[in-house]
Amino acid sequence: MSATLFGLMGAALVGIGLFGMLVRTQVLLRILSFNLLGGGIFIVFGAVARRGAGAGFGGDPVPQAIILTGIVVAFAATTLAVALVLRLAANQDRS
Amino acid sequence: MDWGLLPVLAVMLPVLAMVLALPLGARGAERMTLAVLPIGLALAVGIAVVVQRTGAPIWHQLGHWAPPLGIAFRADGLSAAMLVTTAMVVAATAIFARAEFGTPPGAAERRQAFAFWPLLLAIWAGINLLLVANDLFTLYVGLELLTFAAMPLVCLDGSRATLEAALRYLMFALLGSVLYLLGVALIYGATGTLDIVLLSQRVTGQPAVVLAIAVMTAGLLAKTALLPLHLWLPPAHAGAPAAGSAILSALVIKGSFILVLRLWFGVMAGQPMPGAAQILAGLGAAAILLGSVAALGQARLKLLVAYSTVAQIGYLFLMFPLLAAVPEASEVAARAWTGGVVQAVSHAFAKAAMFLAAGIMAARFGHDRIADIGGAGRAMPVTLLTFGLAGLSLMGVPPSGGFAAKWLLLSAAIGAGQWWWALVILGGGLLTGGYVYRVLAAGLRAGEKSTMAPAPLAWSRDGVALGLALISVVLGFLPLAAFGLLQVGRLDLAP
């Protein structure tokens, strides 16, 4: 039951994030939307892990490992995007 | 003898070189890159020879853990061909880039040079990983590595326009990879594995998997820049330094394209989706026609070449409905598959040559306005010849590699009873001829001598660009049997 609930929540987050990424024009909002979208996907992955529980584990460890890796990648992507935005802003100030 | 380590080494070598190059500084990174180029090329050729000889994909389980618990590397004919292409184009651009990003003895090290060489190695590593990984999540990691390495290459000169282009590229790419990741979650939830070979046996058309493939394809199209999602490509590829543009246009977009192939004809092997494939090829046809028309109207040389990339990407997607319409083991399917992959390979060589030639011209004139490149034919005949030869291959004039690709696709389209794609291929060839002619005609006009920088640039640059263009033409002379390599390990052929 809780897995279904979390899955639906994840789906809702994915929807909100996707909408934000496609519709917003401000870069910072798009980066935040990207993070919402990513967060939604990780929750869906968590629900998948929960459904695959077995052999005495509370959840399937493979999706959990994937979530961890995914968070690292999403964090790296966010920092890269923010660094680029900062550089662009600094460039605008100078000219 | 066990050849399984070859694909692993092909991925490890550029990664290790990149990590070691970082503390060495610009001069050390340059030396490191040039030192690993021949080794990487030898590894790629070795993989191709082994795959060709044994007639079976090279297979390696990391740590001897078998999927679904472990992760496997698998190098089939497609991987082998693309590995060799990647190694050759990377080597050529590295030699070319020495004039721009090299640090001559005695000169101070520059930041751009220090950024360029590790990024080049990182792109090489990312593409190699995408080519040999057999696990959907490992492929995701490769996809992200490739994006993170390619994005800074776009804004290497740090001007405002290139920073904006890079940001736009990053946004498209992030959306693409996050959609891909969503698909990975859905597929794992439905089937319990991410290994492509296992998936090809387990997938029976579950709705969740079909949805996942749709979402992932949409994401990957954004990264490959197929027509409605191509908006980021022209400013990004035209703004990068010449060597960067060559790598981005020739190789980086092919990485995500290969992944689409793996999804449609690996994961979904035996589950053809003819309707969806028609849509995909329809987008490809629109890309060919609109991209070529846009290229015809460009005033600047690098933008023209970038729009030409948008158009040539379209050809890659024509193979999908042809493969979906006929039985997997048929002659027509083999022709469509070979045609699509040869198009990817010949476009890689031709487009790299074209961007390098455009870069040489832009450096010599100090601008790249097509209207003002008169006199190029007299001042730099080799450069213009390079541009023309690469153009011949893009047009599909025999006996070039582009001709082989387009001929195979054309005959497959007729064989599959889908003649309308044949019309698109022919029309696209004419339009390509139009924009290549525009550049050649402008270049062959007499121009004022005074507009040109007096000192000739390094001869090695012209040689490298010409070499790439010649390879793209010579591909057409390969006997058809050599293309048999590409059929090795096609998952839709597996029993």
Image (cartoon, coloured by chain):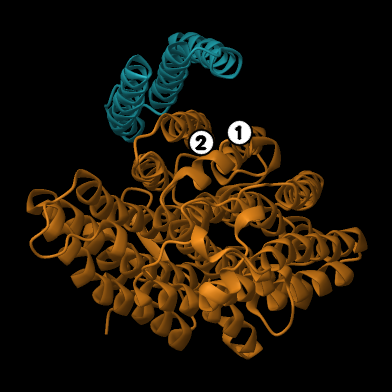
Give the residue type that dot 1 points to: Val
Chain identifier matching the cyan colour in the rendered picture: A
Observer able to see residue B494: no
The disc placed on residue B215 is 1
Query: Which residue does the numbered mark 2 point to in the structure image?
Result: B180
Q: Secondary structure at mark 2?
A: helix
Left or right of B125: which side holds B35? left
Q: Position of residue A1 (x, y in %)?
A: 48, 9
Find out whether the residues at labels 2 and 1 contact each other: C-beta distance under 8 Å: yes
* Vertical comparison of A14 with B233: above or below: above
Observer able to see residue A84: yes
The disc placed on residue B392 is none
Q: Secondary structure at mark 1?
A: helix
Q: Nearer the viewer, residue B367 or B149?
A: B367
Q: Quadrant of the N terminus of chain B?
A: bottom left
Residue at 20% across / 54% down in the picture?
B18
Q: Nearer the viewer, residue B285 or B180?
A: B285
Determine the colour of chain B: orange
